[in-house]
Image (tube, coloured by chain):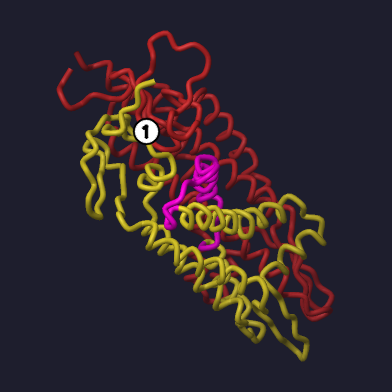
Chain colours: A red, B yellow
Amino acid sequence: MKTGTLTAHQAGMISCQTCHLSSRTPHAAKGVTTCPRCGTILHARIPHTLSRSWSLLIAAAILYVPANVLPITISSSLGSTQSDTILTGVIYFFETGSWHIALIIFIASVFIPLFKLLTLGYLLLSIQLNWKGRPRDRTRLYRTIELIGRWSMVDVFVVTLMVALIKLGALANLDAGPGGAYFAAVVIITMFAANSFDPRLIWDALEGNDA
Amino acid sequence: MAEASHLIACHDCDLLHKLPQLSSDGRVTCRRCGAILVRSRTETVSLSLPLVVAGLILFLLANCFPFMAVSSGGIQQDTIFISGIFQLFQQQMWGLGAVVVLTTLLAPLLHLLGLLYILTLLSLEKKVPAGREILKGVIALQQWSMLDIYMLGVLVALVKLLKMTTVIPGIALYSFAALIVVQVAISIVLDHHHLWEKVVPS
């Protein structure tokens, strides 16, 4: 083994996910071991990381359909009502000239969720198929989706604000549509999916080549 | 169980590193995958405590004063920060309302309160009862506090609204914007590693 490339797992230590303290695991560990500093249960790797991440990913992918097909806002103005989905909202912004806002909503509500779903799927696949290539880039990808995932909530907040403000009687009225709830669910479930994915598995796959 | 507080394992690739004595502000990154292992801020308590207090005051202001009002065709609609949540519950969007309550009210408030408790006791150089559990809670709440994303939502909504109505900003809106700035400042000066060492002395 090369010096200086020892992982905690190889050294018989477990790193706490909460406070990052490294503890030496006793050899015949019975029952549950907890971190001496913060009391969190210690796991060498996130338990059932692959099955949890896959199932959450698939659930989010399924809910992504009603999130985009069902309307997130239902506006009524002077007698006529109009239902808008996330996509029609983007198109509306684009057509009325605020293309920068259209871009923000498109990136936050269409691109980021799709990117997160596809990237997480790619990362999970890379571990299942035991790929050894580009571990650093894959880790960076994981960190990226962890960071940007929550920003998809922006559309939910826009709807929240609009339903409070557009209450001008017969002139203009806005109600939240069912799509919003599904969309919030997609964002939250993908957050949980990213949390249950253990990026250390990317690097564990490389250990097969070391002496 | 033997703990090795002079070693740290990268949370992204599990590589062990010797933790250098962090006597000044700086950061330690994983030499294999680039993850930030430690963001050291020696004066973290004295820097973050006033920010947390300011944040709580701003949070209070943001919820107690008028947030935004729109007027069109002689009708004006005034709102406070939680008006949107009320509307969602009135429309029986319970799940969505609950999510907004969690991410814009509960998580930010509890995060700040938890920090206030820990930092106040640490600055008075006292022991922190239940410090472990509260610090764990504070760390867990961080990713669920989405006020900065709400701010972006406000900006998007503003663009939409300015097209068809007149928008009247309220005190709460400015307090909210200031709160976001304070939250960013807190995330810069907060050193979790240092807090763990102080809250649970080895």
Judged left or right of residue B48, residue B57 is right
Seen in the picture, residue B111 relative to A43 is either above or below; the reply is below
Residue B188 is drawn in which quadrant?
A: bottom left
Q: Classify the position of the N terminus of chain A by image quarter.
A: top left
Q: Which residues are magenta?
A: B122-148
Instruction: Name the residue located 68 percent from the left edge and 70 percent from the top edge.
Output: A162
Which residue appears farthest toward the left when viewing the image? Answer: A3
Which residue appears farthest toward the top when viewing the image? Answer: A28
Residue B3 is drawn in which quadrant?
A: top left
Instruction: Name the residue located 22 percent from the left edge and 34 percent from the top edge.
Output: B18
Seen in the picture, residue B156 relative to B90 is either above or below; the reply is below
The local secondary structure at tag 1 comes to: loop
- In the rendered image, residue B96 lying in the magenta stretch gets the answer no
Judged left or right of residue A91, residue A11 is left
Q: Nearer the viewer, residue A8 or A102?
A: A8
Instruction: Name the residue located 77 percent from the left edge and 75 percent from the top edge.
Output: A167
Instruction: Name the residue located 67 percent from the left edge and 50 percent from the top edge.
Output: A69
Secondary structure mainly formed by the magenta segment: helix
Residue B57 is drawn in which quadrant?
A: bottom right
Which residue appears farthest toward the bottom when viewing the image? Answer: B74
- Residue B11 location (% of width, % of height): 36, 35
Chain letter behind tag 1: A
Seen in the picture, residue A61 relative to A32 is either above or below; the reply is below
Residue A134 seen anywhere in this rendered image of the structure: no
Q: Nearer the viewer, residue B120 or B186?
A: B120
- Residue A52 location (% of width, % of height): 55, 28
Seen in the picture, residue A209 relative to B140 is either above or below; the reply is above
Q: Nearer the viewer, residue A202 or A84?
A: A202
Disc 1 crowd rating (10 Å Cα; few below 14, some 14-19, many 20+) is many
* Residue indicated by mark 1: A21
